[in-house]
Image (spheres, coloured by chain):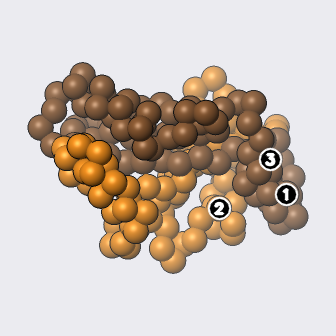
Chain colours: A orange, B brown
């Protein structure tokens, strides 16, 4: 099955990359950008697991490697057709 | 309005980060991972634009700054409640 994991900084954590991109966009004339935050998208393809088992394995992967639980949150989305 | 931009390497481009994470996951026992690709998620909040105008401005931002059109594709998703 296929799944998409979004890893983002927790709300209280300063997003230096986002702030920098926001300033760069303003410099290019995109002054309508009120807020911008940048994270990671991880597209996974897993072998031979049903949705519930896959979801549990993905949570484990995030906790152990894909996300830093101190400063990052993650959300898992199943993709249609998987 | 709020929007989510996903920036990913084009299909033909080698995803070095993804390959490295896949190997690391296999080392941790997650051998069911068949494929993994890593990109960026950019959460945008824009001032005072309707959906169509915002979509056009976001496409411009991607073309000029957020994505590298030589090696990356981007997709724009409107978020509910925006």
Occupied quadrant, residue A12? bottom left
| Separation of marks 3 and 1 at Cα, in angstroms | 9 Å
Q: Which chain carries label 1?
A: B
Q: Residue A66 carries which label?
A: 2
**What residue does disc 1 label?**
B23
**Residue A82: percent from the left, percent from the top?**
67, 28
Q: In this view, does A81 lie to the left or right of A18?
A: right
Please, is residue A81 above or below residue B7 in the view? above
**Pointer 3 local density, CA inside 10 Å: few below 14, some 14–19, many at least 20:** many
Q: Is residue A60 left or right of residue B49?
A: right
The mark closer to the camera, 3 or 1, is 1
Q: CB of mark 3 within 8 Å of CB of mark 1? A: no
Q: Which of B3 and B68 is in front in this view?
A: B68
Occupied quadrant, residue B70? top right
The kind of secondary structure element at disc 1 is helix
Please, is residue B47 above or below residue B49 in the view? below
Q: Are marks 2 and 1 on the same chain?
A: no
Please, is residue A44 above or below residue B27 in the view? above
The kind of secondary structure element at disc 3 is strand
**Residue B28: percent from the left, percent from the top?**
83, 66
Badge 3 or badge 1: first in the primary sequence:
1
**What residue does disc 3 label?**
B33
Q: In this view, does A19 lie to the left or right of A55?
A: left
């Amino acid at each position: 099955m296929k799944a998409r994991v979004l890893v983002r900084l927790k709300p209280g954590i300063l997003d230096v990359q986002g702030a920098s991109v926001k300033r760069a966009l303003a410099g290019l004339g995109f002054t309508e950008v009120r807020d911008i935050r940048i994270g990671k998208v991880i597209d996974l393809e897993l072998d031979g697991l049903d949705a519930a088992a896959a979801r549990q394995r993905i949570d484990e992967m995030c906790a152990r490697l894909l996300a830093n639980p101190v400063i990052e949150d993650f959300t898992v989305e199943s993709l249609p057709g998987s």
